[in-house]
Image (cartoon, rainbow, N blue to C red):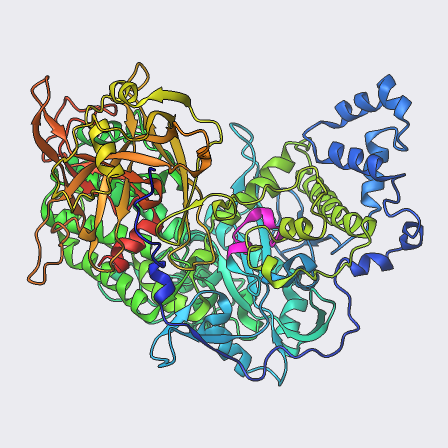
Amino acid sequence: MLSDHSPPRSPNILDTRPVPVTEYHPTSGYILNYEGKNILQKMDDDQYAYRRIDNHFYPFKDRQEWELGRFLCSSSLKQNEIDDFLKLPWTRKMGPSFKSYHALESMIESLPSGPIWRSETIIVDGYITKTPITFIYWDAAEVIDYIFGNPVFAHVMEMDPRKVFTDTDRDERVYTQFMTGDHAWACQDNLPLGATLVGVVGASDKTCVTSHSGGLQMHPAFLSIANIDGEVRMKASSHAWLCTAFMPIPDFEVHADYQSILADRVWHACMDICTVNLKKGAREGRQMSDPYGNTRLCFTPLVGYTADLPEQLLIHGVTKAASPITEATTQNFGDHIGHHPRLGSKTLERIHQLCQKVDPWDLDTFQKAAKALNLNGVHLPFWRDWHQSDPSVFLVPEILHSCHKFFFDHVLTWCKTLVGVEELDLRFKVLPVHSGYRHFAKGICHVQQMTGREHREIQRTIVAVIAGAVPPQFLRAIRAIIDFIYQVQAPRFTDSYIRGFVEALDEFHEEKEIVLQSGARCGKHGPKDHMNLPKLEVLHGFARSIQLVGASIFHSADVSERLLITHCKHPFLNTNHRNFEEQTVRNLDRQEKMRMFELYTLLRGSQNSLVNLMSNEASTISKTHPQSTWMAQILPNEKVVGALQAVCNLFLKGLTGTASNIAFHLNVKPDIATLSLTEAASQYNLPDLPAAMADYARGLSHLDRQGCRQSTGSEDLGFDRVRIWSKFKVQTTSVHNSDDVIPVQTVHAHPPGDRYPYGRCDTVLCGGTDKGNVQASDVAQVRIIFQPISRDASVLQSAMPILLYAQKFKFAGKFDENGILLEEPNIDMYLLRRLFRSQVLPNGKKMRMGDVMAISDVLHPVYIVPVFGKIMDRRINCDNSMELPDMFYLNNFSDKETHHNFTYNFA
């Protein structure tokens, strides 16, 4: 009987970590009473609540009419198209109570409401604008009440600051969510006994809403709370953010020199208006109902604000010649060391001293004097009276712009200059095609503007691609900055991890001189002799920010960029382009009412509680989409139109691997239902397959055979035919949190053919998992995925093992005095060489060394990159780049999980 000779399952490396120790703040998060109501319970107090006693869907007749109305209002259909649909004979026969779009709109607007939109005209005495300045906003305090009282977030919301330590020695802190940072603890220390800290986080940005003409812009501001789990908050689909205001973009009839200072003052004045009650709550506290309906005394300081660099300068009130976070100025943006924080109190002191000397409304004199102090001329910044809110803390370094945009604007440009546009493009074109990786078939140098997603894709391979074509010192500099960018994106930090990325940034600064010496940093007038880049200076702030407010990835602008699309650009398409902000606001108001009313009717119609009483077991997997998880638990058979699809979790249904942190999945139906083993060897061009299968069946491991083939391939294996798959899926748990699963990855193994002349075969890491001893594992290229078909009809086919034939690579690097494999110098990647047998094939080439293994031996998909050298071999293309070269780099930048594993678990 053929058996699976894989070794016993070993525990996940990270499962052996010491159990963290948590210390909660002793005086936080008391409940005042249980008489409050969450936002769903408050719907029962609506003016039409009495009508919903018998009909939960009022003003609609029933669920079917509600779903039709919701669909029409949420669709991209225009008003006249909806009217035409409602006039169809079939629709009239169905008899909906709304006969036109305007009737439907009125019904939607009569649904229970959350915060109420307000409008205010802003007047700047002595200055005229071409059109009136209209400010449309929600009261920010009502917005925070609304988010804090949402039962959807009941199991992903924290009420108590805490200090987390790696072990009982308490020598090393752990930083993840906001509540684990030093700032939350410090804020709580300054609050009354039992008070609940509700940290406000904001985001804003200006965006163009017209595609090619018109130049129309919006400047929305969004709010959320730091109490909500960062992973949830970073999903726009979780609706943890609400659009709170549309900041006016005034056009003053003044000299161009004064346009900016007046617009900046209007922006801060508007922020003052919408946050006045929120600031009062930060000073005095206010009673708020939590997701369970419990009443708490809450304080609302501003603890985070996501914005790009120009917006940060506007918020803090400084010019572009200064850093908004530190005291650094233009001439020291490129310094090796970070500068002291730019405290809000210091900025206010400078503004106050300036206002004592110059009238703030004497714009010409005041602006000149302000610029001399690196101030932008705003004399009343909105945060000035927001208790426990300092821009040096809440202006967090932002990954999308500070890291990814910095990479594209500068680092990639240096690489283009030094490698050459043609050579760099060729190298990207020939990289192996791999699932989950963007293949740049036309290169990267012709694109003038890219998205953050494309920036990330280039970062995954840039280090290995330029190796050999640039001086070693330049390679070290680029590798160090990419290393830094990868490390600061982690969702979990320890003190030693923070030291690790600080060291990476230090290494870049130590090596950056080569960028200048080689002429890679150029401007319009030729090479530059300095590195005074604003975004480079911002990188020094990550360590301090993480210790204060938690992981920076939870403050990335990715979510706000998405919100600009969903809350501005898409609604704008349904406007007539006149008074478009007002129309957009009404659209957003209807969408929010429908979203919450849908949840309310689902719960009321099924006689479930309006309080989220989900079990702890379910809540542990509810992070990314808490509402979907809640509904799936209490209404497992309910199919909600437009509901988010559950995150794929192979651990619930797939095969598990030798390591406990990996699961696999294959399609039930194989790509080839039956094929003889010899035919499979021929079709896949694997002459060694029958003999390799025989060695595996006899239980002869690679070590037992000392790499030599013991079988001939003519042995009776107990089967003659196999089932074959062209791919399988792999999923692992996160290296940062073993409760989290990372997205599914696909491993392909296609035979040579017209589509893939050399086949398409991906690489995996398989074998042992000894920490710090990567050579205990193997890197192998999967050539075929198969399952033997037993001749014995009594043997269940599902009992037969899923096997792989994979061709191996050898770690070709040097070893230290302790026998530990070393990464290649400068690039810090492991060097691989393809292994061959002494047997020569009929075509004169040596046979590649391959073996059969169980699919459960796979530890992780990996991505390898050919060693290109100084000038790339022009015979290489994307079809043969895995076949023609013999030397490869094991790319530790293929994804963030792989990078962390190779940086820390195999370091």
Q: Nearer the viewer, residue 379 or 772?
A: 772
Residue at far top of view: 754
> What percent of the width, then of the height, locates residue 134?
67, 49
Q: Tell me the quarter of the image containing the C terminus.
A: bottom left
- Locate residue 489 relative to residue 189 in the image: left or right: left
Residue at 75 percent across and 59 percent down: it is 39
**Count of all numbered marks drawn on residues in the image:** 0
Q: Nearer the viewer, residue 109 or 777?
A: 777
Q: Residue at x 39, y 53 (%)?
A: 661
Question: In the rendered image of this protein, does residue 805 appear above or below residue 231?
Answer: above
* Quadrant placement of the N terminus: top left
- Does residue 198 appear to the left or right of 602 in the view shown? left
Q: Position of residue 200 (x, y in %)?
A: 57, 65
In this rendering, is residue 146 above or below 784?
A: below
| Residue 262 seen in render | no
243 falls in the magenta region:
yes
Task: Depth check: give the residue in front, 744 or 89.
Answer: 744
Question: From where the camera sits, is residue 52 visible?
Answer: yes
Q: For residue 80, what is the image quadrant?
A: top right
Position of 684 with respect to 729 (left or right) is left
The residue segment tinted magenta is 231-244
Above or below 712: residue 819: below
In the image, is residue 809 part of the stretch drawn in magenta?
no
Q: In screen coordinates, is 102 left or right of 574?
A: right
Q: Quadrant of residue 582?
A: top right
Which of the 4 quarters of the picture holds residue 618?
Answer: bottom right
Q: Position of residue 24 (x, y in %)?
A: 52, 79
Q: Position of residue 492 (x, y in %)?
A: 40, 62
